[in-house]
Amino acid sequence: MHPSRRILIASAFCTALAAAAPFAQAADAPITIMVGGINKIIYLPAMLTEKLGYFKDAGLDVSLQSAPAGVNAENQLIAGAVQGVVGFYDHAIDLQSKGKEIEAIAVLCKVPGEVEMVSTKAAPTFKSMADAKGKTLGVTGLGSSTDFLTRYLAGRKGVASADISLLPVGAGNTFIAAIQQDRIQAGMTTEPTVSQLLKTGDAQVLVDLRTESTTQEALGGLYPAASLYVQNSWAESHKDEASKLAKAFARTMVYIHTHTAEEIADLVPRDFYGNDKALYVTALKASLPMFTTDGHMPAGGPETVLKVLATYKPQVKSANINLSKTYTNAYLDAK
């Protein structure tokens, strides 16, 4: 065969392979994980795993990126731009209803870690979610987990979605500004924003989803939230990497439960807490109980999440959802 013809045939063969597997990835290729707000304490295990060197210990080349909300990170995963996301588990159920399969391979929080904060100005007439009618409530983004949860909390108190306005205000400083400017009368956010608002007196706790007991009271059960999730197809074709990732996060969960808030705070970048490290430590102490001890999915958790989503998303119904495809402990337990 003429050399140029061999080259042409080889080139055509490689092109066909690329077209058949557009998101194929070499086993030792770098792994990009997008975090739905890297400085949020609910997603702290991502940065900790990097700082503790657990990715490198596992032989993984991992880079972390940050997105303003979990829904943005989810879109990047589906597009194949990243291999994993640290975001809320409920996206796995929501996406399955749309024909997309992603699964949580390590669960970081057994409860949302979110808090519905009411502005001090609105507090005298806004004492529970039953008073939310006609109010504007802040969420990180429309279609985000805070969107689902806010509507569910209001609904359980008899307030229909049509009777509230949801405004995407992000997190951190943008959320605080929205409270201070009265653009929202209440909103859902996480630590350390919660502790910052309490310190300045700009807002008060309305519904606390940072503990097991308050979450069970508000939602009717545990609500596994912050998780490491990937596309099911990626995990199946990269079982070794998926297992190493899951186990690296599990090591971090053990570290969190065997070290003090002060020791953990010493590991995070300074821009996570600015000039008030003491406030960050206070926020950490309030948050540590929400983390799982080993990365496993808590029993009964997926069912609670499905119940919440099914309330306001017509396409999310028990008959249409196979929960076993939305999470797995297999990569944590692999030998």
Image (cartoon, rainbow, N blue to C red):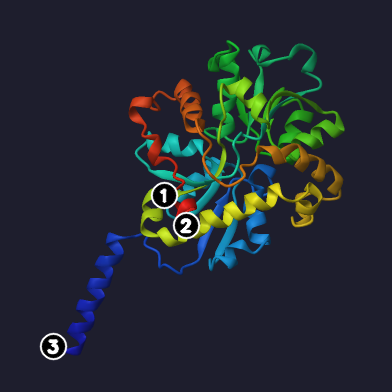
Residue type, mark 2 in image: Ser
- State which mark lies toward you, 2 or 3: 2
Q: Position of residue 63 (x, y in %)?
A: 57, 62
Q: Nearer the viewer, residue 169 or 225?
A: 225
Q: Which mark is residue 231?
A: 1
Residue type, mark 3 in image: Met
Residue type, mark 1 in image: Gln
Q: Position of residue 243 (x, y in %)?
A: 47, 57
State the residue at coordinates (38%, 41%). 325
Taking 296 as reference, is 99 left or right? left
Q: Which mark is residue 1?
A: 3
Q: Quadrant of the N terminus?
A: bottom left
Q: Position of residue 6 (x, y in %)?
A: 19, 83
State the residue at coordinates (78%, 17%). 123
Instruction: Calculate the distance from the C-alpha at mark 1 to the C-alpha at mark 3.
Output: 42 Å
Q: Quadrant of the C terminus?
A: bottom left
Q: Position of residue 261 (x, y in %)?
A: 78, 47
Judge whether 310 appears above or below 176 on screen: above
Q: Residues within 10 Å of mark 3 (few under 14, many from 20)?
A: few
- Dot 2 falls on a residue whose secondary structure is helix
Q: Nearer the viewer, residue 129 or 330?
A: 330
Q: Nearer the viewer, residue 251 or 81?
A: 251
Residue topped by disc 2: 243
- State which mark lies toward you, 1 or 3: 1
Q: Nearer the viewer, residue 333 or 242?
A: 333
- Dot 1 falls on a residue whose secondary structure is strand
Instruction: Calculate the distance from the C-alpha at mark 2 to the C-alpha at mark 3.
Output: 45 Å
Q: Residues within 10 Å of mark 1 (few under 14, many from 20)?
A: many
- State which mark lies toward you, 2 or 1: 2
- Dot 3 falls on a residue whose secondary structure is loop
- The extreme bottom residue here reads 2
Judge whether 245 appears above or below 165 on screen: below
